[in-house]
């Protein structure tokens, strides 16, 4: 009986095993999205999500992400200066300037003894442009890698990564060192270009896109309001304000703006209109289609930066009709872009995060008009100090510049002339302390022993890279900016500059909201966790577990 039972069991097992070979296995859920789309909006304050919320469309991008995705409501930039290059680098490296080295859009390099632009690279040449200034660009000034680089390595370089923006730094730094391509806008020709760091000639699809001459077509539409005038009056100051800049000419004082006059003549103006966002989105779609992003067996990555809100915000400020209309149109552009991804990649088959590289301060003229504290500072600062320093120490150009709210001393001059460095430093500190706009000033190498609020100390320290930072740091009072009588800027630690949106949507993302404080540095490790890859090699952020399914 026992032998018969064993034989029967063996027969049944063998038969079952044989039958399983002919059974079609159940489909296994993918463990990664087909495509990740990183969206950085250049100059977006977090409060725009709610301040403008009632005018955003249900089918637009912002409502779609808020209603169907996850919002990290208290996301902050953990360093200063809060500027474009540092912001894009932080988002994709999960690191801070103290480690990744991108301490500003530009800086004074102590080793090279010259001013350096964040993406400049004299060893490469422009592709698609004859302008050296436009084309000699690469990510080589960034010391760490990016989450896009890690994706490339994790897939044995089978995953594709592409960066696109109007600004070169908005395309190059997010795309990473090992990118398949980064493309940015040449304002002299109205075309997207790249550099020999990536390739020796433009891909056929980029040439085709450029030949469409979309900028001229968009100019013909002019810039008209999307909503009724009374809506803008409800949300904003008057359309025409003397403290707003005039990027379209002295006579262009308000809506509507006649843009057709710039067609085939001036390709730079498009950046200060919502059509700059339209152009960027169309280029992004062209990249997805031509490179077949999201269609391979490995996750691809598209890094897109919308630069126009920054140009518009600098000129007109956050309370302007222009910026409200810009965001109304951007909301619609994003909605259509997501519809395109649904159709091409597949709904719920891709993951999107949306954030900003920095916020922006109100225009000082607006603050003054409403009895709020603030003002301007910095006009002629270096020139005035150098004049007085010459009278005291006998030499010209003792101060080189004031990049990133820091005073950079001319060390070769001070050393060769045997000047009293300590005396110069003390004089500069005393001079700056007397300025109405300045809240504090100190030597940067004494940062950790200077009595400061802990938040300020951490953010200043995170932004300090000795060979690219200055000698003396000054901190402005809230509401004060480094600027002139018109327009506004950003770059400080204050919430209006450092409190940014962070929205998640699509594959692997929960639906919800988080009020706990998180940081820009947390974006890259969260994406890495989603993709099951290593976080970037200089990452100091943490995974936001609440976001992930």
Image: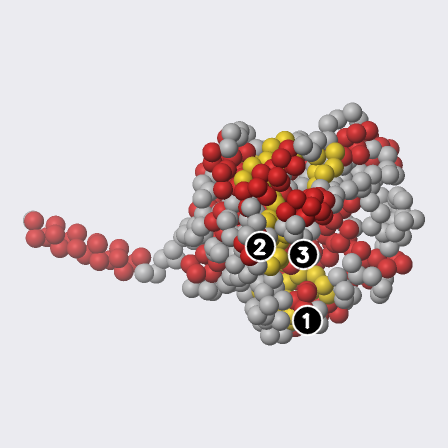
Q: How many numbered dots are placed on residues in this image?
A: 3
Residue 60 visible in rendering: no
Q: Read off the residue under disc 2.
A: 417
Q: Is residue 27 left or right of residue 125?
A: left
Label ID, residue 128: 1
Q: Which label's residue is closer to the chain start, 1 or 3?
A: 1
Q: Secondary structure at mark 1?
A: loop
Residue at 50% across, 37% down: 447
Q: Which label's residue is closer to the chain start, 2 or 1?
A: 1
Residue 303 is situated, as x and y percent measured from the top left of the image, at: 59, 55
Mark 1 and mark 3 residues within 8 Å of each other at the beta carbon? no
Q: CA distance from mark 1 to mark 3?
A: 15 Å
How many residues crowd mark 3 within 10 Å: few (<14), some (14–19), many (20+)?
many
Q: Is residue 37 left or right of residue 233?
A: left
How many residues crowd mark 2 within 10 Å: few (<14), some (14–19), many (20+)?
few
Q: CA distance from mark 3 to mark 2?
A: 41 Å
Residue at 58% across, 65% down: 121
Residue at 65% across, 52% down: 395
Q: Is residue 51 left or right of residue 343?
A: right
| Nearest the eye: 60 or 424 | 424
| Nearest the eye: 16 or 525 | 525
Label ID, residue 167: 3
Name of the residue lying farthest toward the right? 251
């Amino acid at each position: 009986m026992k032998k018969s039972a064993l034989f029967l069991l063996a027969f049944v097992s063998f038969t079952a095993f044989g039958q399983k070979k002919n059974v079609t296995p159940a489909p296994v859920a993918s463990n990664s999205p087909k495509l990740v789309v990183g969206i950085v909006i250049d100059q977006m304050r977090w409060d725009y999500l709610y301040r403008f919320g009632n005018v955003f469309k249900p089918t637009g991008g912002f409502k779609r992400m808020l209603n169907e995705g996850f919002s990290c409501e208290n996301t902050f930039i953990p360093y200063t200066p809060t500027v474009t290059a540092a912001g894009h680098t932080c988002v994709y490296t999960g690191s801070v300037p103290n480690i990744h080295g991108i301490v500003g859009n530009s800086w004074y390099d102590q080793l090279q003894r010259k001013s350096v632009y964040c993406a400049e690279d004299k060893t490469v040449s422009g592709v698609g442009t004859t302008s050296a200034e436009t084309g000699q660009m690469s990510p080589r000034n960034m010391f760490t890698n990016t989450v896009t680089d890690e994706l490339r390595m994790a897939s044995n370089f089978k995953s594709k990564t592409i960066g696109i923006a109007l600004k070169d730094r908005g395309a190059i730094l997010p795309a990473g060192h090992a990118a398949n391509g980064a493309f940015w806008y040449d304002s002299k020709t109205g075309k997207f270009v790249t550099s020999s760091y990536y390739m020796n000639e433009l891909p056929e699809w980029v040439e085709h896109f450029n030949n469409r001459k979309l900028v001229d077509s968009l100019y013909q539409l002019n810039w008209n309001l999307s909503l009724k005038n009374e809506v803008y009056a409800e949300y904003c100051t008057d359309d025409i304000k003397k403290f707003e800049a005039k990027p379209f000419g002295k006579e262009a004082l308000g809506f509507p703006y006649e843009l057709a006059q710039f067609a085939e003549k001036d390709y730079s103006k498009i950046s200060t209109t919502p059509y700059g966002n339209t152009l960027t989105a169309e280029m992004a779609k062209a990249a997805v289609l031509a490179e077949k992003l999201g269609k391979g067996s490995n996750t691809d990555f598209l890094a897109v930066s919308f630069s126009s809100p920054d140009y518009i915000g600098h000129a007109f400020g956050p309370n302007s009709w222009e910026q409200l209309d810009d965001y109304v149109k951007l909301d619609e552009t994003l909605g259509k872009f997501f519809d395109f991804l649904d159709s091409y990649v597949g709904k719920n088959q891709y993951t999107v995060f949306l954030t900003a590289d920095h916020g922006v301060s109100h225009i000082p003229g607006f603050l003054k008009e409403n009895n709020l504290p603030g003002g301007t500072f910095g006009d002629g600062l270096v020139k005035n100090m150098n004049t007085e320093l010459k009278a005291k120490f006998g030499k010209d150009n003792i101060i080189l510049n004031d990049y990133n709210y820091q005073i950079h001393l001319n060390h070769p001059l001070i050393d060769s002339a045997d000047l009293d460095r300590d005396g110069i430093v003390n004089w500069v500190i005393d001079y700056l302390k007397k300025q109405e706009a300045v809240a504090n000033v100190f030597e940067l190498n004494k940062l950790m022993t200077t009595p400061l609020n802990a938040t300020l100390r951490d953010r200043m320290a995170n932004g300090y890279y000795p060979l690219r930072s200055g000698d003396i740091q000054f901190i402005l009072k809230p509401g004060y900016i480094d600027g002139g009588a018109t327009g506004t800027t950003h770059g400080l630690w204050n919430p209006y500059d450092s409190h940014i949106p962070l929205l998640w949507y699509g594959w692997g993302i929960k639906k919800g909201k988080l009020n706990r404080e998180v940081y820009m540095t947390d974006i890259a490790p969260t994406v890495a966790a989603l993709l099951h890859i290593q976080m970037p090699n200089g990452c100091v952020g943490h995974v936001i577990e609440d976001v992930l399914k």
